[in-house]
Image: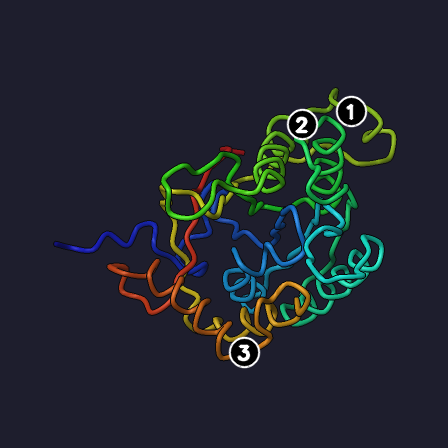
Amino acid sequence: MKLDKSNIYAYGDSMKENKNDKEFSRGMVVVAHPDDAEYGSSGTVARLIREGWEFVYVMCTDGSKGSSEPGMTQSKLSKIRKQEQIDAGKVLGLKDIVFLDYEDSCLTPSLDLRRDIAREIRRHRPDIVICQYPMRNLDGSWGVGHPDHIAAGEATLSAIFPTARDRLTFPELIEAGLEPHKVAEAWIFSHPDPDLWIDVSDHIETSIDALMKHVSQLPVNDREVVSKRMKDLRREKAKGKGMQYTESFKKIPFGR
C-alpha cells in the first residue's frame, strides 16, 4: 500500500496552508497542568522552535493537587510545579509561560476561563494553538480522562472560535488594547482519531529533557525509565508512517 504523506509532516513542507503561502511562525499550547504539554506535544514544540517559531505556553491551573507526599501543601506544591514548568520551558526555548492559576482538579470550561484564554490568544496572536482533547475517552485503554484536561480543551476551542475572533465578545479585552485575532488551526493531542503526525525523531531527547524537569510528577526520577516510556509511546504512534518517533494530533482548520 502506498503511504499517503499528505498529513505526515514536518513543518517545512506543509505550513503554508491558509495564509497565502506565508509560513506560520507563532504557536501556543494551552493545557490544564504543568507537565501536560511535556507529555503531549513537547517534541513538536521543540522541533518548531528549532525551525524558527515562537511558542507560548498557557497553564490553566495552579497544579496544586498532584502529590501524595505527606506534609505537602497546595501552596508549596503550586510553587514547585510553577518553577518546574519554567525550567522545562527554558529547555524548550519558550518565549513565555502564562499561569492562569485556576484551582487544580476544580477546572470547568467557564466563561471566565474562556475569556482568560482568549485574552492570551489576542495578546500573543498564534497561528497554531495546541490543546487537549475536550471529551472523555471511554475505550477502556486507560482511565476515563482527567476532568481538568477535558475542561481545558473545551475552553480553549471555545476561546479560539468564536471568542478571540469576535470584537463584541468580552469588550473589556478591546478596552485593554487586545484586538481580535483569528487562529488558523487547532491541533488537539490525545485525540482518538488523529490526522496529523509530526516527526519528532530528531527532537525526542529535548522533549525528554523538558519532562525530566517535572521532578514532583515523575513516578521514578530515572531518565532511562522516563525515556523508555516516552519513546515507546511515540514509536507506537509512528508505526506505518515511515518515521521513528511521532506526535499525533487532530487538526482543526479555521480558514482565516
Contact, CB < 8 Å: mark 1 with mark 2? Answer: yes
Amino acid at pointer 2? Thr
Q: Residue at x 55, y 66 (%)?
A: 46
Q: Name the spot of residue 158 as percent of width and height, x first.
A: 61, 29
Residue underneath mark 3 = 223
Q: Residue at x 61, y 72 (%)?
A: 212
Measured in 3D between alpha carbons, the distance from the residue under mark 2 to the one under mark 3, in whole angstroms, is 41 Å
- Lower sequence index among marks 3 and 1: 1
Quarter placement of the N terminus: bottom left
Q: Nearer the viewer, residue 108 or 177?
A: 108
Measured in 3D between alpha carbons, the distance from the residue under mark 3 to the one under mark 1, in whole angstroms, is 45 Å
Amino acid at pointer 1? Phe
Q: Is residue 256 above or below residue 15?
A: above
- Lower sequence index among marks 1 and 2: 2
Q: SS of the residue at dot 1?
A: loop
Residue underneath mark 1 = 170
> Left or right of 13: which side holds 176?
right
Q: Nearer the viewer, residue 73 or 155?
A: 73
Q: SS of the residue at dot 3?
A: helix
> Left or right of 125: which side holds 36?
left
Q: Neighbour class for label 1 at 10 Å: few (<14), some, many (≥20)?
A: some
